Amino acid sequence: NAGVMQNPRHLVRRRGQEARLRCSPMKGHSHVYWYRQLPEEGLKFMVYLQKENIIDESGMPKERFSAEFPKEGPSILRIQQVVRGDSAAYFCASSPGLAGPGGETQYFGPGTRLLVL
Amino acid sequence: RKEVEQDPGPFNVPEGATVAFNCTYSNSASQSFFWYRQDCRKEPKLLMSVYSSGNEDGRFTAQLNRASQYISLLIRDSKLSDSATYLCVVKRGSGGNQFYFGTGTSLTVIP
C-alpha cells in the first residue's frame, strides 16, 4: 500500500508564475489536508478536502491560493502569481476519515519544497 | 493565545536518559491528541495517538490531562535515533476539522 505521494518534491518558480502542487492520498483515504511549513516554524493548516468538496478552507490565504480534490486524480494546491513569501514546504496528509481510533490519523506525504526566486 | 504550545527546547540528553515533553492546548473542546515526530526536512510521522487512559508503546508513554489541558510524552532509554523534533497535535471535537500543530520540541540524543 503506497503512502501519500506528492509531486514535485522540489519546485522553483519566479515571482508572478503559477505553482501547482499535487497530492495522491493513500489508497482508501478520502480525506486530504494541506499544510504549509515555513522555515523554523510549525505546520499551519491550510485546507481540508474530501472528494469534490472543500470542507474547511479557513487556513487558506484569501487570494491567489486554491485547492481541489476531483473525483478522479490527485488533489491540487494551486498558487497563482507566486511571491517570495510563498517559499515554504507544503505538506499533504490523508486520512480514512472514519469514526473510532485511528480513523482520523493523518499520514503525511514527503512534501513539496517551493522556492520562489 | 496559541491553540497548542510546546517548549521548543532544544533538549540535549545522553543516550539512555529519560526525557519528557509537555504540551498545552487552549481549547477545552479538543478531543483527539497525537504525537508526531519530524526529522529534519522530512514529513511528520505519527508516533502515537494519546488516549484518555494514557498509553504506552515500547519506550514511549503518552499521557493526557484534560483538567489541566496538557499532554505529555515520556521517552525512556533514549537512543541516538530518537533525535528529532516532536510535534504535539490536537484536534477539536465535533464541528472542527482542523488539526492544530505545535511548533515542536527539538530533541538531540548525545552519544
Image: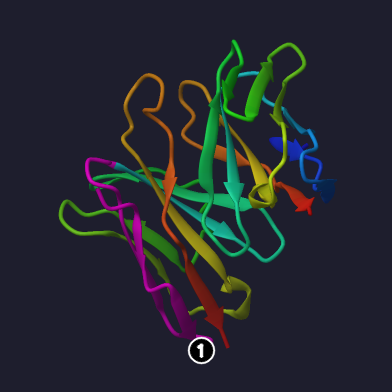
- The chain that hosts pointer 1 is A
The magenta-colored residue range is: A1-30
Quarter assignment of residue B68 = top right
Query: Where is residue A106 drawn, in percent x and y?
Result: 43, 40
Identify the residue at horizontal 59%, vertical 22% (top origin).
B56
Identify the residue at horizontal 48%, vertical 58% (top origin).
A91
Q: Nearer the viewer, residue B111 or A84?
A: B111
Crowdedness near tag 1: few (<14), some (14–19) or many (≥20) residues, C-alpha within 10 Å: some
In this view, B53 is above or below A116: above
**Residue B2 seen in the figure:** no
Q: Secondary structure at mark 1?
A: loop
Report the colour scheme.
rainbow
Q: Would residue A78 be found to the left or right of residue B1 on screen?
A: left
Q: Would residue B14 be found to the left or right of residue A55 on screen?
A: right
Residue A25, magenta (yes or no): yes
In this view, A84 is above or below A76: below
Q: Nearer the viewer, residue B81 or B95?
A: B81
In this view, A75 is above or below A112: above
Q: Would residue B95 be found to the left or right of residue B71 on screen?
A: left
In this view, A42 is above or below B54: below
Query: Where is residue B11 drawn, in percent x and y?
Result: 83, 47
Residue A4, magenta (yes or no): yes
User: Which amino acid is tagged 1?
Assistant: Arg
Identify the residue at horizontal 73%, vertical 20% (top origin).
B69
Query: Where is residue A45 drawn, in percent x and y?
Result: 54, 48
- Quickly name the residue at label 1: A14
